[in-house]
Image (cartoon, grey):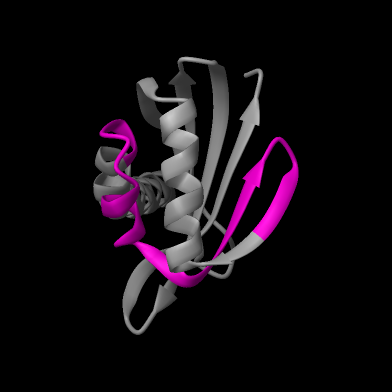
């Protein structure tokens, strides 16, 4: 009886974890599509009012409008040959993030995107590109 209870509990917990991961993946779907299309305009639709952009450890905070221009410049110099998120997660506070593999014409990057809730919707707070992965 105890064994069946713990088995059922483990099954329910696994279901909740997989549904949570699926929901996080859905939140990042439009972001993934904008990056694949190298569309800074589409990506900017998902920016928080202030966005931290990092390129190989050089971090700076930008307004959403400024961040759009920085990303436009990045995409112009490093058009994506391929891109996909390979891992989704969330902090203990519920902040969703995704890790991706971005292959551009000037090399491969490990990409990290963190979102936050702004006025009831998920917006990009951080994008980080680290070359060499």
Q: Is residue 67 above or below residue 117?
A: above
Magenta segment range? 35-60
At x 46% / y 15%, what residue is drawn?
105
Q: Is residue 76 above or below residue 63?
A: above
Residue 12 point in image, percent of width and height: 31, 53
Q: Can residue 33 be seen in this view?
A: yes
Instruction: Indicate whether residue 59 is drawn in magenta.
Output: yes
At x 38% / y 50%, what residue is drawn?
17
- Which is nearer the eye, 2 or 75? 75
Residue 76 point in image, percent of width and height: 42, 31
At x 42% / y 34%, what residue is drawn?
75
Residue 90 point in image, percent of width and height: 51, 56
Residue reaching furthest to the right: 57
Residue reaching furthest to the bottom: 119
Tag count in the figure?
A: 0
Q: Is residue 22 visible?
A: no
Asked if residue 128 lies left or right of residue 120, the reply is right
- Which is nearer the eye, 65 or 21? 65
Residue 49 point in image, percent of width and height: 46, 75
At x 66% / y 18%, what residue is drawn?
132
- Which is nearer the eye, 25 or 107? 107
Instruction: Indicate whether residue 131 is drawn in magenta.
Output: no
Q: Is residue 102 above or below residue 4?
A: above
User: Which quadrant: the C terminus?
Assistant: top right
- Which is nearer the eye, 53 or 22? 53
Please identify the quarter of the rendering in which residue 65 is found.
Answer: bottom left
């Amino acid at each position: 009886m105890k064994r069946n209870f713990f088995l059922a509990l483990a099954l329910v917990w696994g279901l909740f974890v997989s549904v949570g991961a699926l929901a996080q993946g859905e939140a990042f779907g439009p972001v993934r599509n904008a990056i694949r299309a190298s569309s800074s305009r589409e990506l900017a639709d998902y920016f928080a009012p202030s966005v931290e952009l990092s390129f190989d450890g050089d971090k700076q905070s930008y307004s959403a409008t400024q961040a759009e221009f920085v990303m436009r410049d990045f995409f112009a110099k490093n058009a994506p040959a391929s891109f996909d998120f390979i891992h989704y997660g969330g902090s203990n506070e519920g902040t969703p993030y995704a890790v991706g593999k971005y292959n551009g014409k000037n090399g491969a990057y490990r990409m990290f995107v963190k979102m936050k809730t702004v006025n009831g919707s998920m917006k990009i707070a951080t994008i980080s590109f680290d070359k060499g992965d």
